Image: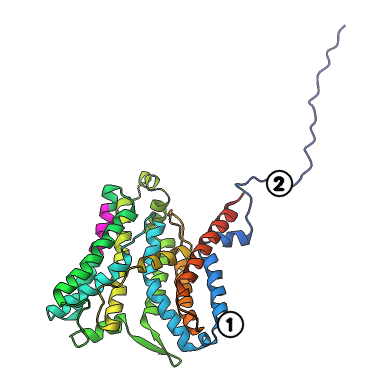
Amino acid sequence: MSMTRQAEPAVTTPPAPGPKETDGRTRQRSVALRLLARPEVGVFLGAVAVFVFFLIAAPSVREGGSMATVLYQSSTIGIMALPVALLMIGGEFDLSAGVAVVTSALTASMLSYQLTMNVWMGVIVALVVSLAVGAFNGWVLVKTGLPSFLVTLGTFLILQGVNLAVTKLVTGNVATDDISDMDGFDQAKALFASSFDVGGVQVKITVVWWLAFAALATWVLLRTKYGNWIFAVGGSKESARAVGVPVTFTKITLFMLVGFGAWFVGMHQLFSFNTVQSGEGVGQELIYIAAAVIGGCLLTGGYGSAVGPVFGAFMFGMVNQGIVYAGWNPDWFKAFLGVMLLGAVLINLYVRRAATRR
């Protein structure tokens, strides 16, 4: 008789619990790396370093009036650096931003004076002209596919020539006439170029506008659909278009925002000095772009913030006035800016690589 032996099921012992394995996708980054991944952190640390340096090198900076001047200088750069930064996040940049400021001021001044109109009419027409210049840049860009460098370089040359030629034709001079005695001037000055007292220190209204615009731009970038569109078109416009982002609308409106910034700064210059020099503005576009780059925005687009350019503009204002208060040769200003720009680019590159390293 044969007997059949039934096999018993094997008993397996579960492995002892050990450390949980993670790959690069699930590994948690340290708090320091997460902070450094923010585009504004590096420039904030740089701004603190520059501020402390000039507090030591130029003791007069510690006075309230000196800091008010630093903030004023920063605000005139920062108001324009904000829309320029948004445009750079969207993957483009504007070389005509500097002369567009002067174009806006010239338009308002000459229209008001030559036609003896209320200055508010000139202000409104100047706004329309500035928005039209921005829309033109954006429209040519999206319709031709040309790089924004070429499109806005052409606009820069056109505006520079028009500013000089039209001003000489209309006024017979390179500057506009004084409009300080015209109707509406005092009200416009109160909005664009007034000052208010804080603890015995006169602070320019542009500082308030600068911070308000920065808060608004931050909200738009982080809390609105339009902010998502800006990052999307800056990262890859083809991919953005594939998921339904209105690329054409976003690009054109970003250029129009730069036009709005140029109008606002132009009105400030006009109502601060009552007249405008038609040859000014050349080179300012590089200052605005540099403030945005120092603030963490990339020329390649898709990365940046609105807070970073605030600190970038503050660094510009701090260096500009700090050199004067320290009694140094002001010719060193551009050298300082070059060092800051190159240093910011290298630091941002290192920080991004470290923050994304797995």
User: For the residue carrying disc 2, how many other residues have a C-alpha within 10 Å: few (<14), some (14-19), or many (20+)?
Assistant: few
The image shows residue 238, relative to residue 74, as above or below, that is above
In the picture as drawn, the residue positioned furthest to the top comes out as 1
Q: Residue furthest right?
A: 1
Q: Is residue 135 magenta?
A: yes
Please give the range of residues in magenta. Answer: 131-140
Q: Main secondary structure of the magenta part?
A: helix
Q: Locate residue 357, reporting x and y percent.
A: 60, 51
Closer to the eye: label 1 or 2: 1
User: Viewer-proximal residue, 332 or 101?
Assistant: 332
What amino acid is labelled 2 in the image? Lys
- Residue plotted at (57% across, 52% down): 356
| Image side of residue 321 versus residue 125, left or right | right
The x, y position of residue 66, in whole percent, is 47, 86
Distance of label 1 from label 2 (alpha carbons): 51 Å
Q: Which mark is residue 124?
A: none
Looking at the image, is mark 1 or mark 2 earlier in the sequence? 2
Q: Position of residue 172 (x, y in %)?
A: 15, 77
User: Above or below — where is 128 with respect to 117?
Assistant: above
Quick one: 297 or 188, which is closer to the camera? 297
* Image coordinates for residue 124, horizontal then vertical, percent: 21, 73
Judging by the rendered image, the residue that carries numbered circle 1 is 56
| Residue 25 included in the magenta stretch of the image | no
**Label for residue 20?**
2
SS at mark 1 in the image = helix
Q: Nearer the viewer, residue 114 or 3?
A: 114
User: Quick check: 188 left or right of 237?
Assistant: left
Q: How is the image coloured?
A: rainbow
